[in-house]
Image (cartoon, grey):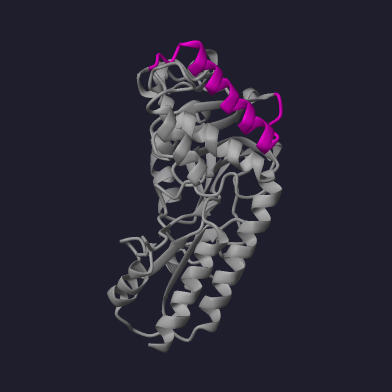
Amino acid sequence: MTKIYNFSAGPAMLHSSVLEAVSKASKDYEGHGLSLLEMSHRSKPVMDMISETEFLARELLNVPDNYHILFLQGGASLQFAMVPLNLLDMNMTADYTDTGAWSAKAIKEAQLYGNVNITCSSKGTVYNHIPKKLNQSDDAVYLHITSNNTIYGTQWHEFPKPINDGYLVADMSSDILSRSIDISRFGLIYAGAQKNIGPAGVTMVILRDEILDKVNRKIPTMMKYRTHIDKGSMFNTPPVLSIFAVNRTLDWLKSIGGIDFIEKKNKLKAQKLYDEIDNNVLFRSPVKVENRSMMNVPFIFAEQGDESSFLYYCNQRGLQTLKGHRSVGGFRASIYNAMPEEGVDALIQAMKDFQLN
């Protein structure tokens, strides 16, 4: 049977040990005779699991004590509204960078709740780079970035520094846990799980306590960060099985050497693939070299070609979900933490062989 490698941008590939653990827990969780799907979220086994998940995330990311870790729902899309709702008053200003479709959506939501200054935009070049110059506001409460752009394949390799007393807010949905970061540089980080953390259904939010309680508006209880902090991510019934998958993903990452180890592997995988794209006469990268993502690698034909034929060729080899986003076309290989080097090697070989056909 052909080995399948899933290059989907999300929901994305999970490590086999995670899939096995989730399968087992869905039938009988740790010998309790109940599926994790039917256990009360307030039972001791489940509460212990959620606490352990927070501990693993705090350990792997080296999260300082004055930061909270929350497991919420609604994906990054809900955070586009929750961030300004909790942090930006109508008379305040926030700086936003426009580097892709998801940052544009974050900007649109923030404009409902306060003044938004767009510090830079690469929209005019189809988001093929990260602008170097940011025109920040002197009085901005925070500077929002999308650390990795899933559709266009760009990534912030050096994080910008907010001016004056502002702090960084980052959507890290597609590259959290892929590289070492200094959490203390950020006021808030949010990440939908379905790329590098686990399955869809849970969103991790890491936030510094001191940034809260600064706005004067009425906020729906469910939309308040303070609500979820006070209730330990259990204000409403949490997505227990998704959190368990996150737990197993974090445990797997810890077992192989943590973020320092996976960062080296991710750099190696990405470099191998970019080298093939640059050296194969059939393909090219639309992204500026200095801004290329380690997680999402888009590529296109150097000259006009039949995209469906290459996708079919790859699919026959077990290389699935390589079609580029519907808004840009071409191809995209998402090579998150769980993608082994062998998967990238298999794609490279397919590109070489297709060139010879």
Where the N terminus falls, by quadrant? bottom left
x and y percent of residue 18 in the render? 49, 39
Q: Is residue 262 left or right of residue 224?
A: right
- The mark tally for this picture is 0
Residue lying at 53% horizontally and 69% vertically, measured from the top left: 345
Q: Is residue 299 magenta?
A: no
Residue lying at 44% horizontally and 75% vertically, measured from the top left: 350
x and y percent of residue 98 in the render? 48, 53
User: Please, is residue 347 above or below residue 294 in the view?
Assistant: below
Q: Is residue 61 left or right of residue 32?
A: right
x and y percent of residue 256 in the render? 66, 45
x and y percent of residue 262 in the render? 64, 51
User: Please, is residue 52 above or below residue 204 in the view?
Assistant: above
Q: Does residue 84 appear in this view? A: no
Where the C terminus falls, by quadrant? bottom left
User: Please, is residue 352 above or below residue 76 in the view?
Assistant: below
Q: Nearer the viewer, residue 84 or 4?
A: 4
The part of the image, by quadrant, that contains residue 60 is: top right
Q: Nearer the viewer, residue 89 or 309?
A: 309
The part of the image, by quadrant, that contains residue 252 is: top right
Which region shows up in magenta?
Answer: 39-65
Q: Is residue 61 magenta?
A: yes
Q: Does residue 352 appear in this view? A: yes
Q: Main secondary structure of the magenta part?
A: helix
